[in-house]
Image: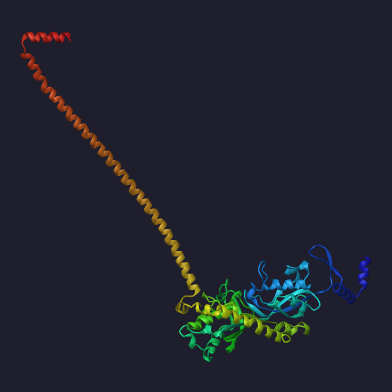
Amino acid sequence: MQRAARKRKLSKEEWKKRKKTNRNTEASQIVNNTGEKTVRPFPKRTVAIVIGYLGADYQGSQRNPGVKTIDSELESALCKVGAILAANAGSFEKVRWGICARTDKGVSAVANVVCLKALQVPNLLESLNSHLPSDIRAFDIIKVPKKWSAKQRCSGRSYQYIIPTSVFRSVDVLSENYVFNDEMHKKVQDLFSIYLGTHDFHNFTTGREGGQAASKRYITQFEVSKPLVIDGMELIKFSINGQSFLLHQIRKMIGTVVSIVRYNQSEKIILEALRPDRLIHTPVAPGLGLMLKKCLFDNYNLHAEPGAKITYENIQEKLNEFENEVLIPHIIKTEKESKVFLEWAENCHKFPEEEILHGKTKKERNREERASSIVKDEVDVLQQVVVKSEVDVLQQVVKSEVDVLQQVVVKSEVDVLQQVVKSEVDVLQQVIVKSEVDLPHEVKREADLPREVKSESCENKNET
């Protein structure tokens, strides 16, 4: 009760002042990962870090245990400079880690934005760069509101794709006669302009179906630069702006245009691929030329305090230097050594134009597949019935044939027996007849014998 009374005596302003003093104290104790108490000399604050990186040696930006990523390298450097405590290392939830745009394997960034709660170490930017690898750089650190999220506050992403002009050479034109002229530039620009606006890009990503809200994206800009020669290689730059992008979406959009130009096919292929009821395979351009140019925070900057706005005016010179001295030279060097774009263009997927433009929609194909499946099931049932009936008929036929054979066998046996009996009877009859024939002759012979012989024969008979 006394404590409650003392609390009520303090005014609201005094309580705010005391709370702020306790939060910003330079000797607040915390517990590290070994269980021992240690001193946290600096207060925590949510910050946004603008970073650029060359993604050639990384498996993307998002942390993935066991592989080298941008997030893991940046977190390691922040731990080394003391901006992240050892107790919080490896736990992005504790520091509220977030990144504005996740990039794929091999994809670079001129200016990506990472947010987290970090200890306010003196000279954090310089210390961080001294512990980062040479292919990752931190350009700026901005203090932002407490629950600020880079992903949620971002209103758009700007990407850039650099590619040699030679990939647009038609298969019917010799390499020595090919020139990326104004006519070709206009053709490429017109094809890319088809992507502007809101469309269903399920054919330009993986794992998405047409007609879903998650497959739709809004493209605000798609510009093609004039050709420029750098280190003896003619290149063009694509500038793509949009609210957000799907996995492989930009690379598939560019791959589709390259294939159409190389094989002199109709632009209607793009229109068909943007239909939610069509299922069309689209080629994926190499990730070598893709880079995140910058993240846009236009809506947030309208209401943010001057010191908390995410802008690039003060660091634009550093960003241009990083792009022109690190990222673009790497693209040119890799292409000269490995011919990544050239080999991809030569093996680029050719669209089955006749099938796409005059073929059937996905719904029609599904309907036919369902109908064929039903017919197949019915045929299987009929086949089973027919087979069963045929088996029954065969069994009956076999049974009847067995009965007939048994009757034939029995009849034949009877006939044979009858014949045998008849033959035996005939033989016996012959024997009887013969014996009857022979008996009168013997009687007659006895009658012709003399009396003495007869008497002797009678005596012999009597003795017998």
Quarter occupied by residue 26: bottom right
Q: Nearer the viewer, residue 30 or 174?
A: 174
Q: At which x and y percent is residue 20? A: 86, 75
Q: At which x and y percent is residue 326? A: 66, 81
Quarter occupied by residue 55: bottom right
Q: Nearer the viewer, residue 191 or 258?
A: 258
Q: Residue at x 53, y 90 (%)?
A: 181
Q: Quadrant of the C terminus?
A: top left
Q: Quadrant of the N terminus?
A: bottom right
Q: Nearer the viewer, residue 350 or 288?
A: 288
Q: Residue at x 25, y 39 (%)?
A: 412
Please give left or right for residue 251 compared with residue 310 in the image. left
Q: Residue at x 6, y 13 (%)?
A: 449
Please give left or right for residue 463 compared with residue 331 in the image. left
**For residue 193, above or below residue 412:** below
Q: How many marks?
A: 0
Q: State how the image is colored.
A: rainbow
Q: At which x and y percent is residue 419? A: 21, 35
Q: At which x and y percent is residue 383? A: 40, 58
Q: Is residue 119 visible?
A: yes
Q: Residue at x 5, y 10 (%)?
A: 450
Q: Is residue 267 visible?
A: no
Residue furthest out toward the bottom = 182
